[in-house]
Image (tube, rainbow, N blue to C red):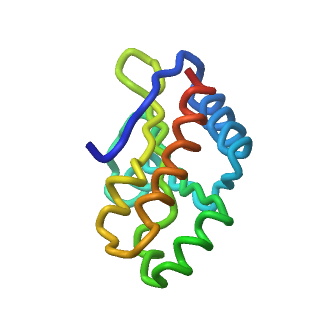
Amino acid sequence: MYGFSVRMSCGFDEAVEQVTEALKTEGFGVLTEIDVKATLKAKIDVDRKPYKILGACNPKLANQALNADPDIGLLLPCNVVVREEDDGSITVAFMDPRAVLALVDEAGIEQLAGQVRDKLEKVRDQLA
C-alpha cells in the first residue's frame, strides 16, 4: 500500500485548515497546495468534488534525505490529499514515505522514512 487515511466529518475548508495545523505540530509546512477541482474545471471543464493536494515538508528530515541522495528530491515533498466524498465526509490521505522511499537504495533512508511515517501517523491520529 502506498498510503493511509482518516475520515473527518467537518467541512472541506475546515478540514484543510485542520490538516495544515496538525502538520505544523509535527514540524511540517505546506509548500504547495494544488486545487485539483479548480484546475480541472479551468483546463478541461470537468466538475469534481473538492480535492486538494498539499505538498508537506519537514525541513530537517528533508535535509537529511537530500544529504543521503541529492536526487531524492524527485520523491519529495510528502503529498497529503484532502477530498470530499459522495456522502459529504472528508478523507485525508497521506503518502506512505516507506513505500515511496523504498525506491532509494541508500543507507539510512529506510530509518528516515520510518521517522517521517511516524510523524504523519501522529498527524492522522490528531485528525481522527
Question: Between 10 and 44, which is closer to the camera in this rendering?
Answer: 10
Which image quarter: residue 49? top left
Image height check: is 128 above or below 70?
above
Quarter of the image for the N terminus: give it: top left
- Taking the spot 49% from the left edge, 78% from the top edge, the residue there is 68
Image height check: is 6 above or below 2?
above
Which residue is most to the bottom?
70
- Taking the spot 65% from the left edge, 43% from the top edge, the residue there is 23
Q: Is residue 114 left or right of residue 48?
A: right
- Taking the spot 41% from the left edge, 48% from the top edge, the residue there is 95
Q: Is residue 123 left or right of residue 5?
A: right
Question: Between 13 and 17, which is closer to the camera in this rendering?
Answer: 17
Which image quarter: residue 124? top right
All told, the count of numbered labels is 0
Residue 74: image location, x then y, percent: 41, 75
- Taking the spot 38% from the left edge, 15% from the top edge, the residue there is 87
